[in-house]
Image: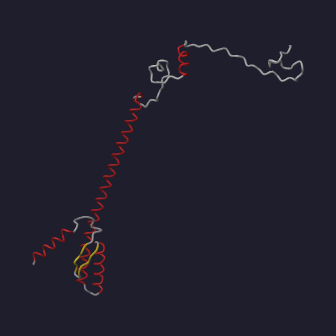
Amino acid sequence: MRSSKSRSRAKNNRNRPSGGNVVNRVFDSSGPEGKVRGTPQQIIDKYNQLARDAQLSNDRVAAENFQQHAEHYLRLLSEAQREMEARREEQERQNRERQAERDRERAERQEREAAARQADPAEAPQPDVMDFSPEATAPDSSLVETPESKDAAPAAEAPAKKEKPARRPRTRKPKAAPETAEEAPTSNGDAPEAAE
C-alpha cells in the first residue's frame, strides 16, 4: 500500500507547475488546524489570524506554530518578489541598452548621410531636365512631331542673332464729330480726310 501512496504523491507533484509566478500561484498548506488553500499572501493572512486567535485563547504553542507557518510563506513570497524585481530591473537595463544602441546607430546613419550629401553634390538627387535643342528634337528622337514643332524647326535653324521686326504704329480711332453732310462717310465706309 505504501508504494501506491508515494506514487500518487509523485503524480500530483508532476501536475503542479514548477516555478512560474509564485505571487499568484495557489498553494495547499497543511497546517496544524488542517489545510489552508490560497495564494501566499492569503495563506500568510490566514495563519496570522489563526495565531491571533490562539494567542487570545492562551495557547502559546499553537500561536507560535501558526506564526512559523506564516513566516515560511512570508519568506517564500518575499523571495519570489525579489526575483521578480531583479528580472524586471534586468529587462529594463536590457531595454535601455537596446534603445541606446538604436539611438547610436541612428545618429551614425544620419552623420553618414549628411557627410555623403556634403561630400559629393553629384550624388544628391538631381532635378529632371528636358533638352529642347534641335538635336534632341530630331526625327530620330522619341518625341512626336507636331505642327508647332515643324514651324519651330526652321526658326531654330536660323542664325542665332535675330532682328526684331519693326513695330507697326498704333492706329487711332478718329474722334467722333457731329454728323454733317460734308463729313458724312463715303460709300466705301471710310471717313473723308479732314483738311489741315
Residue at the far right in the pictured view:
181
Instruction: Judge whether 183 appears above or below 54 on screen.
Output: above
Residue 115 image offset from top left, x and y in percent: 39, 33
Q: What residue sits 10% from the left and 77% below the top?
A: 2
Q: What residue sits 55% from the left and 13% below the top?
A: 158
Q: Coloring scheme of the render?
A: secondary structure
Q: What residue sits 24% from the left and 75% below the top?
A: 28
Residue at the far bottom in the pictured view:
57
Residue at the far front in the pictured view:
187
Instruction: Judge whether 44 appears above or below 151 on screen.
Output: below
Q: What residue sits 29% from the left and 78% below the top?
A: 46
Quadrant of the rendered structure where residue 74 is? bottom left
Image quarter where the C terminus lies is: top right
Residue 112 image offset from top left, x and y in percent: 37, 36
Residue 96 image offset from top left, x and y in percent: 34, 51
Instruction: Judge whether 186 appears above or below 69 on screen.
Output: above
Quick one: 144 or 57, which is closer to the camera? 144
Numbered disc total: 0
Left or right of 100, for residue 168: right
Quick one: 58 or 160, which is closer to the camera? 160
Quadrant of the rendered structure where residue 84 is? bottom left
Left or right of 131, for residue 52: left
Image quarter where the N terminus lies is: bottom left
Residue 53 image offset from top left, x and y in percent: 30, 84
Instruction: Judge whether 109 appears above or below 169 on screen.
Output: below
Quick one: 60 or 116, which is closer to the camera? 116
Quick one: 17 or 161, which is closer to the camera? 161
Left or right of 2, for residue 140: right
Quadrant of the rendered structure where residue 75 is? bottom left
